[in-house]
Amino acid sequence: MNLERFHNRLALRLGRERIVCEKRFDIYVDDKRNPDDPWVAIEVKGMPRRIGFYSSDEPGDDAWRKMLRKDQIAIVESLGIGQKIQVTINAVHQAYLDTNKGF
């Protein structure tokens, strides 16, 4: 996988709003572990565990809910960012698809 292309596609998909302006969660990409399928983690402020997944993982509806325990879901819901996290997960997966299809 062309990692530079993946990072560029991800930045385009997420946009400035989620990369720079969003203060309730941070996005981390680990492309050293598996260069062909980067590990992505979303760290929500105030939540001890990150939401982690491979970029190739099919997101599905409310994918973030399936990755967390009930108490962590409550934190995300109390912050009102569930939909933003879902959009981020979808953007990561789409950047993976775009990179591997050569778009």
Image (cartoon, grey):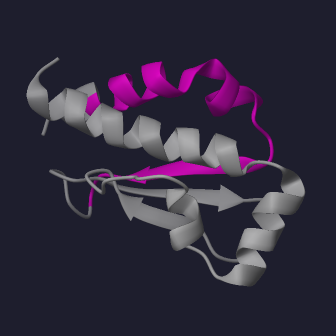
Foreground residue, 75 or 3? 75
Foreground residue, 66 or 101? 66
Q: Is residue 75 left or right of residue 92?
A: right
From the top left corner, tell me how far across and down residue 72 is, in percent.
73, 75
Quadrant of the image containing the C terminus: top left
From the top left corner, tell me how far across and down residue 75 is, in percent.
82, 68
**Can residue 47 be spotted in the picture?**
no
Query: Is 70 situated above or below 102?
Result: below
From the top left corner, tell me how far across and down residue 102 is, in percent.
11, 22
* Residue at image location 36% in from the left, 23% down from the top: 8
* Residue at image location 65% in from the left, 31% down from the top: 18
**Can residue 73 be spotted in the picture?**
yes
Q: Quadrant of residue 92?
A: top left
* Residue at image location 40% in from the left, 63% down from the top: 53
Query: Is 71 situated above or below 102?
Result: below
Residue extending furthest toward the front:
61
From the top left corner, tell me how far across and down residue 70 is, in percent.
71, 81
Q: Which residues are magenta?
A: 6-32
What is the total number of numbered labels drawn onto the structure image? 0
Q: Quadrant of residue 57?
A: bottom left
Foreground residue, 79 or 7? 79
Q: Is residue 73 left or right of residue 27?
A: right
Q: Is residue 75 left or right of residue 93?
A: right
Query: Is 8 situated above or below 75?
Result: above
Magenta-drawn stretch contains 74: no
Quadrant of the image containing the N terminus: top left
Magenta-drawn stretch contains 18: yes
